């Protein structure tokens, strides 16, 4: 990967954020605390991030004129989602530094390219195969075995664009239902638990990782994160080393999340990388209230060319997502001692929609 552009912002400078969801909103709030302004670009007029910034552009990512005006108004550009269209990233990159580097998106937008990249670094992943037709799916199944997980190469999230194939299922029907020509088949991993590492890397190559987080999903959507993860110190060090290796190999600037499975092997537990998210991540929301510095501030510092903080966790932390109708309980959460509530200001709750989260920090280590 090419060397990242040198950026050095001063208080009062403006950061451009592509995407207006809750991640953009929390990035803008962290930037404001550091005296930096944000300009949010999003095609959605109801973007929650618009509520917390003075400058907002509501336009499509294909609107070159709007992109150019946006770029002219900011000093550096970042993004809160990984599916930034490459044409938009190119228009912006010609005018202002885009951090993390837009070329990283080519790796992380495609599950096959991402897995190949991780494997080249000598890091473990589930066994996988490229699938582009029903015939290649049958070939992949005969090599990898069942159960297995079929995933679209692009645009999958929160369990969308994926299907488990078990013995006795009809792979031809599952292939037709997935409705794509480019997918990967992964061995199904009987994991002990799922963990993630949120890592920040500065342009000078310094990396700071937050404590490893343990993640519990419901219906494929993150429901609860706990830090620290209930794993040995040795495994936690291994997980952090994996994230650091990935961030360094990408010559990354900003915060990234590496999701991993913990599996039991004969030699003891080890980690397998499931996915890289080139952005701040839901499993790092606990850092807002549970650590001396949040993932959002780390990201802003990194892209501003400012020194990263050394995060100190305040105690054992639990983060609970308020998904869909969970938001209706917000008044109850407000009465719970020690709970810190974050509502994203979104409109109507829909099933699966992330509406807010609650953090609870215990006073002392268990
Ligand atoms: P992903 O979209 O790849 O992050 O997958 C969403 C969730 O599906 C993960 O957090 C796991 O709970 C589950 N999952 C994905 N891939 C596998 C796999 N190869 N084996 C077992 N579970 C998986």
Image (tube, rainbow, N blue to C red):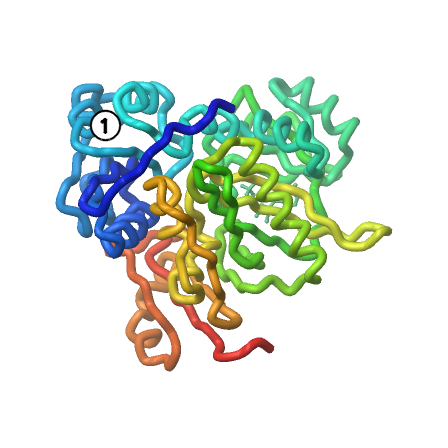
Q: Is residue 200 left or right of residue 55?
A: right
Up/down of 54 relative to 148, above or below: below
User: Which of the 4 quarters of the picture holds residue 148?
Assistant: top right
Q: Does residue 111 appear in the picture of this structure?
A: yes
Q: Is residue 95 left or right of residue 333?
A: left
Q: Residue at x 51, y 32 (%)?
A: 251
Q: Quadrant of ligand 1?
A: top right
On the image, the x and y values in percent for residue 362 come to 49, 77
Q: Outermost residue toward the left?
A: 54
Q: Residue at x 57, y 57 (%)?
A: 212
Exactly how many numbered labels are in the figure?
1
Q: Is residue 150 left or right of residue 305?
A: right
Q: Residue at x 38, y 61 (%)?
A: 288
Up/down of 245 relative to 61, above or below: below
Q: Does residue 347 appear in the picture of this structure?
A: no
Q: Nearer the viewer, residue 292 or 45?
A: 292
Q: Quadrant of the C terminus?
A: bottom right
- The residue labelled by disc 1 is 60
On the image, the x and y values in percent for residue 175 come to 60, 27
Up/down of 166 relative to 218, above or below: above
> What kind of element bears circle 1?
loop
Q: Residue at x 49, y 51 (%)?
A: 221
On the image, the x and y values in percent for residue 319 come to 45, 64
Q: Nearer the viewer, residue 161 or 14?
A: 14
Decide: few, some or many residues near mark 1? Use Cα within 10 Å; few <14, some 14-19, many ≥20: some
């Amino acid at each position: 990967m090419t060397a990242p552009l040198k950026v050095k912002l001063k208080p009062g400078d403006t950061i451009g954020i592509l995407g207006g969801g809750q991640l953009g909103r929390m990035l803008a709030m962290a930037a404001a605390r550091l005296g930096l302004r944000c300009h949010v670009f999003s095609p959605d007029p109801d973007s929650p991030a618009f509520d917390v910034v003075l400058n907002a552009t509501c336009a499509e990512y294909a609107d070159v004129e709007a992109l150019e005006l946006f770029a002219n108004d900011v000093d550096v550009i970042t993004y809160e989602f990984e599916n930034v269209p490459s044409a938009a990233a190119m228009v912006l990159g010609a005018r202002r530094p885009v951090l993390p580097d837009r070329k990283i998106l080519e790796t992380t937008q495609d599950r096959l390219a991402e897995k190949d990249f991780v494997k080249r670094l000598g890091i473990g992943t589930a066994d996988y195969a490229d699938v582009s037709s029903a015939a290649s799916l049958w070939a992949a199944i005969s090599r990898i075995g069942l159960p297995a997980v079929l995933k679209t190469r692009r645009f999958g999230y929160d369990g969308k664009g994926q299907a488990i194939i078990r013995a006795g299922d009809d792979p031809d029907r599952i292939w037709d239902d997935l409705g794509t020509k480019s997918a990967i088949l992964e061995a199904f991993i009987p994991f002990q638990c799922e963990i993630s590492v949120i890592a920040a890397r500065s342009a000078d190559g310094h990396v700071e990782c937050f404590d490893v987080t343990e993640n519990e999903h419901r219906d494929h959507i993150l429901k609860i994160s706990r830090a620290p993860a209930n794993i040995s110190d040795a495994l936690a060090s291994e997980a952090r080393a994996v994230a650091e290796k990935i961030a360094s190999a990408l010559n990354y600037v900003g915060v990234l999340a590496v999701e991993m499975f913990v599996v039991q092997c004969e030699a003891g537990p080890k980690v397998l990388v499931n996915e890289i998210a080139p952005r701040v991540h839901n499993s790092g929301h606990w850092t807002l209230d549970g650590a001396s510095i949040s993932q959002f501030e780390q990201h802003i510092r990194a892209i501003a060319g400012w020194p990263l903080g050394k995060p100190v966790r305040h105690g054992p932390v639990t983060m609970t997502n308020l998904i869909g109708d969970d938001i209706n309980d917000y008044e109850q959460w407000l009465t719970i001692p020690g709970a810190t509530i974050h509502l994203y200001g979104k409109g109507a709750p829909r099933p699966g929609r992330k509406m807010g989260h609650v953090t609870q920090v215990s006073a002392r280590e268990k």
